């Protein structure tokens, strides 16, 4: 039951963080993002938190399913393909956005921010699917 509770906590966190991320981006464009270090840091942190929480959600789901949890973020996400199909692949691709943004490849950051913003519906669908699969014990 502890893993189920963790999945619920992560679901709530991800939904909340996506709302925060989306609100910040309503006021931001590439120019303000690159010129305002406080805004940039906040957006980058939010992007990081969304992706890492999604990875944690997946790792906990894999444990519920008694699967091995791989060592990299991308591999963790791809390990959910058996259950989540193409959504798992889409989520795995977002780990690159997180890595590039957090490690400061500046010319790629805004593109990564837009990619994650445009993936909002996929992220939410993935989170919901994992929550349902974990709760129902489906394969």
Image (cartoon, helix red, strand yellow):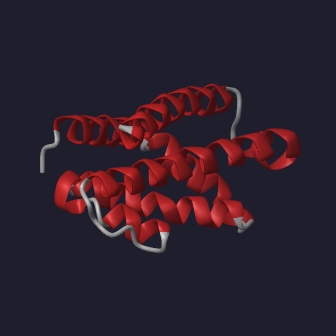
Going by the image, does 69 lie left or right of 31?
left
- How many numbered discs? 0
- Residue 134 vertical placement versus 78 (above, below): above
Residue 83 sits in quarter: bottom left
Name the residue rendered at 52%, 46% in the picture. Answer: 53
Q: Quadrant of residue 121?
A: top left
125 left or right of 41 in image: left
The outermost residue toward the front is 1
Let me know if residue 58 appears in the view. yes
Q: Quadrant of the N terminus?
A: top left
* Residue 50: percent from left, percent from top: 55, 44
Residue 135 vertical placement versus 108 (above, below): above
Question: Residue lying farthest left?
Answer: 139
Q: Nearer the viewer, residue 133 or 122?
A: 133
Q: Is residue 36 visible?
A: no
Q: Quadrant of residue 81?
A: bottom left
Expressed as whole percent of the image width and height from the top left, the position of residue 60 reads 39, 51
Residue 52, horizontal then vertical, whole percent: 55, 52
8 sits left or right of 115 in the view: left
Q: Residue at x 41, y 57 (%)?
A: 59
* Residue lying furthest bottom: 71
Residue shown at 63% from the left, 66% from the top: 100
Q: Is residue 96 left or right of residue 64?
A: right
Q: Work out whether residue 44 or residue 7 is closer to the camera in this orientation and state it.
A: 7
Compared to residue 122, the image places residue 23 above or below, namely above
Residue at 50% over, 35% down: 14
């Amino acid at each position: 039951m502890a893993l189920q509770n963790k999945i619920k906590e992560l679901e709530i966190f991800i939904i909340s963080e996506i709302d925060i991320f989306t609100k910040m981006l309503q006021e931001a464009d590439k120019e303000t993002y690159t010129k305002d270090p406080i805004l940039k840091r906040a957006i980058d942190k939010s992007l990081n938190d969304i992706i890492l929480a999604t990875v944690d959600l997946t790792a906990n789901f894999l444990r519920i399913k008694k699967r091995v949890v791989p060592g990299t973020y991308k591999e963790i996400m791809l390990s959910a393909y058996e259950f989540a199909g193409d959504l798992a692949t889409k989520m795995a691709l977002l780990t690159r956005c997180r890595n590039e943004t957090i490690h400061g490849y500046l010319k790629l950051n805004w593109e990564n921010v837009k990619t994650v913003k445009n993936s909002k519906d996929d992220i939410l669908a993935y989170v919901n699917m994992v929550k349902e699969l974990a709760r129902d014990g489906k394969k």
